[in-house]
């Protein structure tokens, strides 16, 4: 099924509303991921190195988490416009290779998807609906498919 204009609007609308609390949002997203999968913390170089620093004081953490939100929103826009997602983005040419190198596996993508959806639900409860959930889920799944495609360049 195609990604509709309405679905794009739901994603863009909620992301615009969430952006106002961007730093809180980024921290919550990360904390949610580690609540479900504590061992995932070890994957992030900027978290495993400085053990003493509390998560909320880590300068890299929020920016990284927000990138995932922004890219998923961008994915929704591309899905509607072009019917597909491409991660040829200049900054992160090889997102697939990078995640493979850091030891990210299939289960991690499911944990992050769950955490992403829960974080949105808590950030904009007044907007939240099953349609909104489905739109974000689809945008995320398609983005992940594009990243995974890069993880297996031979296929
Ligand atoms: C790095 C996006 C899923 C773990 C990155 C970076 C981006 C990104 C843009 C590079 C950031 C930078 O170097 O500035 C995404 C997107 C995802 C996704 C869009 C899904 C749609 C995941 C998942 C995991 C994960 C499921 C596993 C829990 C990591 C790790 C790094 C990374 C470990 C390297 C961090 C470091 O520099 O130490 N991700 N990611 N990512 N991501 Fe993801
Ligand atoms: C995946 N990749 C990079 C940063 C992230 C932050 C929070 C959750 C998932 C992430």
Image (cartoon, helix red, strand yellow):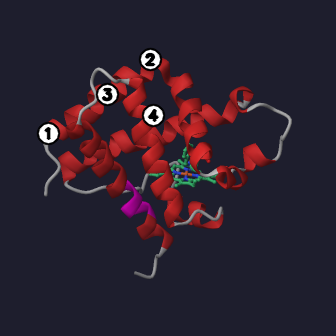
- Name the outermost residue toward the bottom: 154
Q: Which residues are magenta?
A: 143-147
Q: Earlier in the sequence, mark 2 or mark 1?
A: 1
Give the residue displayed 46% in from the left and 68% down from the top: 150
Check mark 4 vs ligand 2: CB closer than 8 Å? yes or no: no
| Contact between labelled residues 3 and 4, with CB atoms less than 8 Å apart | no
Q: Determine which of the numbered discs, if any, sits on residue 5 in the image.
A: 1
Residue 47 as seen in the image, left or right of residue 137:
right
Sort mark 3 into few (<14), some (14-19) or many (20+) by Cα contacts within 10 Å. Answer: many
Which mark is drawn over residue 20?
Answer: 2
- Secondary element under disc 2, as helix, strand or loop, is helix
Question: What residue is disc 4 on?
Answer: 119
Choose the circle earlier in sequence order: 1 or 4.
Answer: 1
Q: Residues within 10 Å of mark 2 (few under 14, many from 20)?
A: few
CB-based contact (under 8 Å), mark 1 and mark 4: no
Please tell me whether residue 98 belongs to the stretch shown in magenta: no
Instruction: Answer with left or right where residue 103 lies relative to residue 14.
Output: right
Q: CA distance from mark 1 to mark 4?
A: 23 Å
Do labels 4 and 2 touch, CB within 8 Å? Answer: no
* Residue name at image x 51 percent, y 35 percent: 66
Q: Look at 78% across and 48% down and name the residue there.
A: 48
Most common secondary structure along the magenta stretch: helix
Establish if 105 lies above or below 131: below
In this view of the protein, which residue sits in the foreground, 8 or 94? Answer: 8
Residue marked by disc 3? 14
């Amino acid at each position: 099924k195609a990604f509709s204009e309405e679905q794009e609007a739901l994603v863009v609308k909620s992301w615009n509303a969430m952006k106002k609390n961007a730093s809180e949002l980024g921290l919550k997203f990360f904390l949610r991921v580690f609540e479900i999968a504590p061992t995932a913390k070890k994957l992030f170089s900027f978290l495993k190195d400085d053990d003493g620093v509390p998560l909320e004081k880590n300068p890299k953490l929020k920016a990284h988490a927000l990138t995932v939100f922004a890219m998923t929103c961008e994915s929704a826009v591309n899905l509607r416009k072009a019917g597909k997602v491409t991660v040829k983005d200049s900054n992160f040419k090889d997102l697939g290779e990078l995640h493979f190198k850091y030891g990210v596996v299939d289960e991690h993508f499911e944990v992050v998807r769950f955490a992403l959806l829960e974080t949105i639900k808590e950030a904009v409860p007044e907007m939240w609906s099953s349609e909104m959930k489905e739109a974000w889920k689809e945008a995320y799944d398609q983005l992940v498919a594009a990243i995974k495609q890069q993880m297996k360049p031979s296929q």
